[in-house]
Amino acid sequence: MDKQAERSEASVYRAVTRSIQVTVEPSFVEDESSPGEGRYFWAYTVEIVNLGLEAVKLRSRFWRITDGRGRVEEVRGIGVVGKEPLLKPGESFEYTSGCPLSTPSGIMVGTYQMQTEKGEMFSVEIPAFSLDMPDATRVLH
């Protein structure tokens, strides 16, 4: 495996809850960061795949963001990127968002609230993923 393939696979995080697979791939955005001013910015791409047998709708999200100093911020909201995607069996939804930090590393973890067609609500795990500058040692805090 070449170095680029190793690097990209190493930065992919995946979890499956109740047949809903969530994959996250974070990346440091140098153009949006100013380390001298204490601003570090990451983009993260999330793919949500319905591996189950029933359609589900993503209703809300919850994030716990911890910076390198241990400060925690919690974010809750309706849907993702302004949408509440409906995923039929075998369908997927992908989006990219971002996270600014005042430290050169951090960690994000969270949940999505999903709803079945019958109205049942359930939580889906968003795997913990590390936000580290390129060439830094990855550590899940």
Image: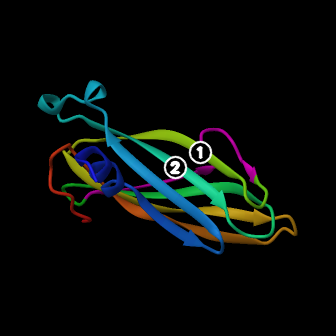
**Position above or below: 13 against 96:** below
Spot occupied by residue 91 in the image (x, y as percentages of width and height) = 72, 53
Spot occupied by residue 116 in the image (x, y as percentages of width and height) = 80, 66
**Position above or below: 45 against 60:** above
Looking at marks 1 and 2 on the same chain, the residue that comes earlier in the sequence is marked by 2
**Position above or below: 127 against 59:** below
Measure the C-alpha gap from mark 1 to mark 2. 6 Å
Q: Residue at x 12, y 29 (%)?
A: 36
In the picture as drawn, the residue positioned furthest to the bottom comes out as 18
The part of the image, by quadrant, that contains residue 48 is bottom right
Magenta span includes 42: no
| Residue type pointed to by label 2 | Val
**Residue 129 visible at all:** yes
Residue denoted by label 1: 94
The part of the image, by quadrant, that contains residue 76 is bottom right
In the picture as drawn, the residue positioned furthest to the front comes out as 1
Q: Residue at x 79, y 70 (%)?
A: 53
Residue denoted by label 2: 46
Residue numbers of the magenta segment: 71-86
Magenta span includes 79: yes
Q: Residue at x 27, y 54 (%)?
A: 106
Spot occupied by residue 44 in the image (x, y as percentages of width and height) = 42, 44
Q: Residue at x 51, y 49 (%)?
A: 46
Considering the numbered disc 1 on the image, is that residue within a helix, a strand or a loop?
Answer: strand
Spot occupied by residue 117 in the image (x, y as percentages of width and height) = 86, 64
| Residue type pointed to by label 1 | Glu
Label 1 packing within 10 angstroms: few (<14), some (14-19), many (20+): some
1 and 2 marks in contact (CB < 8 Å): yes
Considering the numbered disc 2 on the image, is that residue within a helix, a strand or a loop?
Answer: strand
- Out of 28 and 60, give the one closest to the viewer: 28
State the mark number for residue 28. none
